[in-house]
Image (spheres, rainbow, N blue to C red):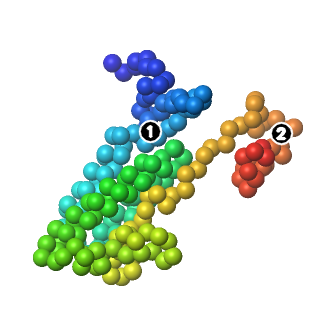
Amino acid sequence: MKTHIIHRRDGFDFLGFHVRQYCGRGRRVCLAKPSKKGVQKHLRNIKDVLSNNMQAKADDIIKRLNPIIRGWGNYYRYSNAKETFNYVDYRIWQMLWKWCLRRHNNKGKKWVRNKYFGQIGKMNWNWTFKSDEGHYLFFTASIPIRKYAKVKGYNSPFDPRLEQYWEKRTRGKEKYSDW
């Protein structure tokens, strides 16, 4: 069965997003979040990279993982994904920790932590995966979540009277409330 009717509170998956209506505190909000299948597929992909590169250097792992993590995060940046990004970063950290401990099973956890994890500049991220060459693993949670601005009423880009309105929108420098 390809098409079926569901209630908006149950939601549906579409192009890797789970869209549903959330109700609470007298408000109804329709939100799109990354779907469970999309998150699981991404984490499985990262796990495969780590499993296939057990003997690789930390720098090679970072070079392989950064484009995967950044691309996945940029795809979902326009959804309500902040909690999911934090969860994905935590799961990636767990996988990297196991990868490090497996590589150095005769060393202590403190030694492993000092070798593979460090702090990025002035940021308070003390457990950032790093290489000896000074490269760091990208955090999905560092991607800013962007919201689309709704178009006011029945405004059309083809209406010559609304030229200023559409100029402001395309510039993107003004705040949403100014539109």
Mark 1 packing: few (<14 Cα in 10 Å), some, or many (20+)? many
Residue 43 appears left or right of 170: left
Residue 58 appears left or right of 14: left
Distance from Cα at disc 2 to Cα at disc 1: 33 Å
Q: Is residue 5 above or below residue 93?
A: above
Disc 2 vs disc 1: which is toward the camera? 1
Mark 2 packing: few (<14 Cα in 10 Å), some, or many (20+)? few
If you read the primary sequence from the N terminus, does the residue marked by circle 2 or circle 1 appear first? Answer: 1
Q: Is residue 113 above or below residue 86?
A: below
Q: Amino acid at mark 2?
A: Leu
Residue 91: mark: none
The single residue placed furthest to the right in the displayed view is 161
Report the residue at 36% width, 82% height from top: 133
In what element is the residue under mark 2?
helix
Residue 17: mark: 1
Report the residue at 55% width, 51% height from top: 145
Report the residue at 30% width, 79% height from top: 114
Q: Position of residue 150 (x, y in %)?
A: 68, 38
The single residue placed furthest to the bottom in the displayed view is 133
Q: Amino acid at mark 1?
A: Phe
The single residue placed furthest to the left in the displayed view is 106
According to the image, label 2 marks what residue?
162
* 25 vs 107, nearest the viewer: 25
* 53 vs 21, nearest the viewer: 21
Image quadrant holding the C terminus, namely top right
Q: Which image quadrant for residue 92?
A: bottom left
* 28 vs 148, nearest the viewer: 28
In what element is the residue under mark 1?
strand
